[in-house]
Amino acid sequence: MTEEALWLDGNGLAGLLVEVFGAEMTSVRRRCQSCGERHAIGSHRLYRGAGDVLRCPNCGDVALRIATLPDRYVVEVRGTWRMAVARD
Amino acid sequence: LERAALLERLSLPRAPIRWRTVTVSEVVEENAQAATLVLDFGDWPGHAAGQHVDIRLTADDGYQAQRSYSIASAPEDPRLAITVERIDDGEVSPYLVGEARAGDQFEVRGPIGGHFTWRVKDGGPLLLVAGGSGLVPLMAMLRHRANQGSDVDARLLLSARSLDDVLYREELSRLQDVGIHYTLTRSRPDGWTGYDRRVDAEMLAEVGPGPSDEPLVFVCGPTAFVEQVADGLVALGHPPDAIHTERFGPTGP
């Protein structure tokens, strides 16, 4: 089994992203701070371990880190995320 | 686009998400490794084909295991169904396939996801490529298309180990206006005339539609399978943005 076979798509993080951000996030497009490409969060690479890490599908630089602790999420966001969220 | 439609497309819906206790209303054995579970969710808010639900099991000692499963039923279907493939050393699927019975209860939240989805109004042509149980969310798209009476050009390329591993085989045979192609990678019946190798660029080109037709492409399966298919599609000239992928990890055919 190659290392590449262990990652998933950002789609797989959709539930946790709703918990953290309060909205559906996988269709949000992000511009990578490293390579400059724009990709939907759902098409980023997801690595799940003690925390969850999203990486740019082009260059592999980190896009998002989430650590889920008993009483809070610790979140680090990188690159340019552009989104519109519906108002109630 | 109308302003309302544009807003709907551009803005993210507020999506409060909570776990609910859901009752299994029916279990349908699909084959030796997979089962469809019909779930009584109560007031299901509706979903788009391609979305998933999260399922959480809690042991007596409080230990919790959580997994995502694609929704198999069409948005038009009044009954919410998922199809699960059993991973023998998994934490959740060995319960869902083999042990779960009508009347069982567990926690579910959803629908979840907005990137790997297709609605009839998104148009086509549609190229769907599945590895094993990666067929499940793509089947929801084909069921949605059929329920809506859509005539969008749709092709399905399905890779499975053997014919017995193909989910929804009888239902697929009734979808006469969908171009369905099988490749059987491990064993084939006598006189098999379909493909007999792993998906490659040549096979994808034969199934079509090609990049000049600007198809919406959805690929779902084990990670290594999706990698190979996505590489083939890009090599043929499909723009990466048109290729939607859903990888479900290292296991599969």
Image (cartoon, coloured by chain):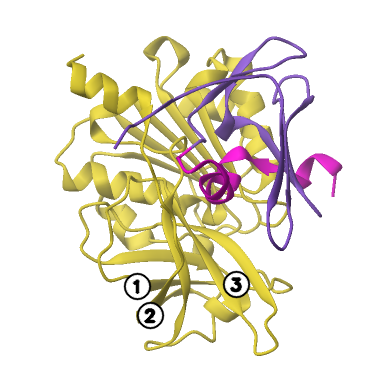
- Residue B86 appears at what percent x and percent y? 60, 71
Whether marks 2 and 1 lie on the same chain: yes
Position of residue A46 measured from the top left corner of the image (x, y, whole percent)? 70, 41
Which chain shows up in purple? A
Q: Which residues are magenta?
A: A1-24
Circle 2 crowding by C-alpha within 10 Å: few under 14, some 14–19, many from 20 = some
Which one is earlier in the sequence, the residue at label 1 or at label 3? 1
Q: Sequence order check: which comes first, mark 2 or mark 1?
A: 2
Whether residue B50 sits left or right of residue B222 in the image: it is left
Specify the amino acid type for callout 3.
Ser
The disc label shown at residue B24, or none: 2
Residue B166 horizontal/vertical position (percent): 48, 59
Estimate the spatial distance between the alpha carbons at disc 2 and disc 1, rounded to whole Å: 6 Å
The residue to which callout 3 is attached is B93
Disc 2, disc 1: CB below 8 Å? yes
Image height check: is B191 above or below A32?
below
Q: Secondary structure at mark 1?
A: strand
